[in-house]
Every structure is written in structure tokens, then in C-alpha cells.
Image (tube, rainbow, N blue to C red):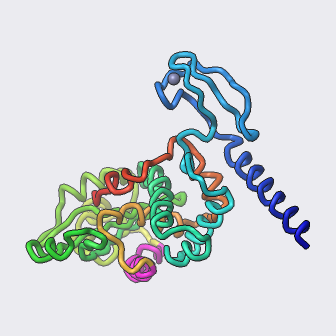
Amino acid sequence: MLQHDVKLKKFDLHTNDVLKRDFYKNRVVETCPICESNWYIKYGFYNGIQRYKCKVCEKTFSRTTNSLWSYSKKNTRTWVEFTELMTENKTLKFCADKLNISIGTAFYWRHKILEALSIDSTPDNLSGVVHVGKVIIKENFKGCRDAEMLASVAPRENIFIIGAKGKEDSMFIKPIFKFKYRWDNDAFNEKVYSKIEKKSYIAPYGDRYIKLVAMKHNRNKSIKVETEYRIKYLWPNLKKWLSIFHGVASKYLQRYLSFFIIMNLDKVIDYMDLIYDRLFEGNRFMKTDEIRIRSSLF
Ligand SMILES: [Zn+2]
């Protein structure tokens, strides 16, 4: 019986290495991560993963350097399982208990993944019939040390979020401005309208300002448009989704919205797609202390 267990343990270690090698197999290293020179040579393998040596600064690096999971001491399988649980919208506590990691690690991993996903989730432009709607949510100071103090000196403001869906699976959901009394036309133009192609047709949902923008843009052109339910019901859907996380601090809202977009695209994406297509690409490494610094509402 004991022998059997030992064998399985070895097998586990082996699959762990194979998995890791496979994730990094196609990762492209363009420049030395230390000095950014592109003069480097192949320098053997470590655990089956290609290493390089920079001819300028003489440091060695590999295909795993500066990737999302660089320097993590946990095994590959744990990251994969964590990503899977995340796409199933499990809570941090659930992930921590199930994978035997601390809540702190779970929090850090979640934000690493969210940040990596937010790098390329916003389309540069929206074309075709562009469905535009809005959601207004209250500012949330969750996790902020001075939350109560902040709330007492300045009442929570409203955050205006715009959701837009163009053709070819392009979706845009972003906080645009904070407001007390009025619609901010400049912010809307800069962050949303500038991304909508001139030739496109705007289909507005439930907001008089957006309707005005659409009327002007469409110049009384009227075409029959099929309802885009993801924009029409953006508010109930988003509210339901955010409630899973028991409220999201406003400073992290952008990151969570990027994840929400990915989970709402036409293309059905599973956790393996996320890992292969998004998480192991490019320069995604982030230090623990950057998690908080690199987040902002706008
Ligand atoms: Zn170098």
C-alpha cells in the first residue's frame, strides 16, 4: 500500500513538470528581462524548459521569467485548479480551503489573474451595430483601512459604467466617471465615443444621454436592430455577478469587469483557454506590493 502511494506521488511530480513545460512551450522571449537587450543565446535547459543567457548583462533567464507565475513555490497543478475555480466564481475562502493555500495567496493570485486578463480585454474600436447601455453603482471602499473615515467626510459617489457591444465579439465595459449631479460628456466622448467607428450605428439602451448621443450619431437613420440582451440586462447581470464577491472595492472594479467581459463573450472560454491563450503570454509578472498600487478606478 505504501509503495503504491509513493508511486503516485512521483507520478504527480512528473505530471506537474510536464504541465509546466507545456504551458511555456510557445512562450516567446523577445528581450532580456533584466537589461532589455535582444542579444542573447540559448543556454541549456532547466526541468525541460529552455534557458537563455544575455550577452550584454550576462544574466541567465528562461521562458518562465516574468510570467504570471514566476517565483511561485506552489505547483503548477494548484495554479490550474485555482484558475478553474475562479471561472466557476468560487469565493477566496473556498479556493483557499480546497487548495490548501492561505487567503492572502488566494487574494494575490486572483488579482494577478484579473490584472493579466485586463491587459488586452478592451477592444480598440467598436463597429457595426454598437449597443450601448449603462450601469450606475455606488462607490465601494471595501478593504480600505480608512473606509469608515472616508465615508463620513465624503459620501460615496456614484460610478457611471458604460457597457458597449460591437460586432465580432467585441465588448467594452468600463467605469467612465464618478458623479454627483450630472452626466460627464467629455469623459464619455474620450473613453467611449472615440472608440465607436463613424460608420457604425448606435443602439442605445435606457439612458436619455446615451439616446441623445445615438440620435446625433445615427442622424435619424433608423435600422432594425436585434436586442442585445447582455447590454439590455447589464445591470441585473452585473449586480448578480458582483454579489458573488460580496461587493468589489472600487479601485479593483476595472479588473473584475475585464473578467466579467471574458465570461460574457460569444466565444465560450474555459479555464484551459484562459491559461493557454492569456495567462502564459508576455510579461505578466506582478510583485505582491504592485497588486494594490497598479489598481485604479479609471
Ligand atoms: Zn541582459
The residue sitting at 50% across, 77% down in the picture is 93
The residue sitting at 42% across, 48% down in the picture is 124
The residue sitting at 31% across, 74% down in the picture is 135
Q: Assign the C terminus to one quadrant of the image.
A: bottom left
- Magenta stretch: dominant secondary structure: helix
Q: Which residues are magenta?
A: 226-244
Say which of 87 and 201 sits in front. 87
Q: In the picture shown, does residue 213 fall above or below 285? A: below
Taking the view exactly as shown, the residue that stands out farthest to the front is 2
Q: Can you tell which quarter of the image residue 139 is in?
A: bottom left
Instruction: Say left or right for 186 vs 253.
Output: left
Instruction: Say left or right for 265 vs 237.
Output: right
Say which of 7 and 55 sits in front. 7
Place of residue 285 in the rendered image (x, y in percent of width and height, measured from the top left): 49, 46
Place of residue 150 in the rendered image (x, y in percent of width and height, measured from the top left): 15, 71
Q: Looking at the image, how many numbered discs can be counted on the residues? A: 0
The residue sitting at 55% across, 69% down in the picture is 86
Q: Can you tell which quarter of the image residue 16 is in?
A: bottom right
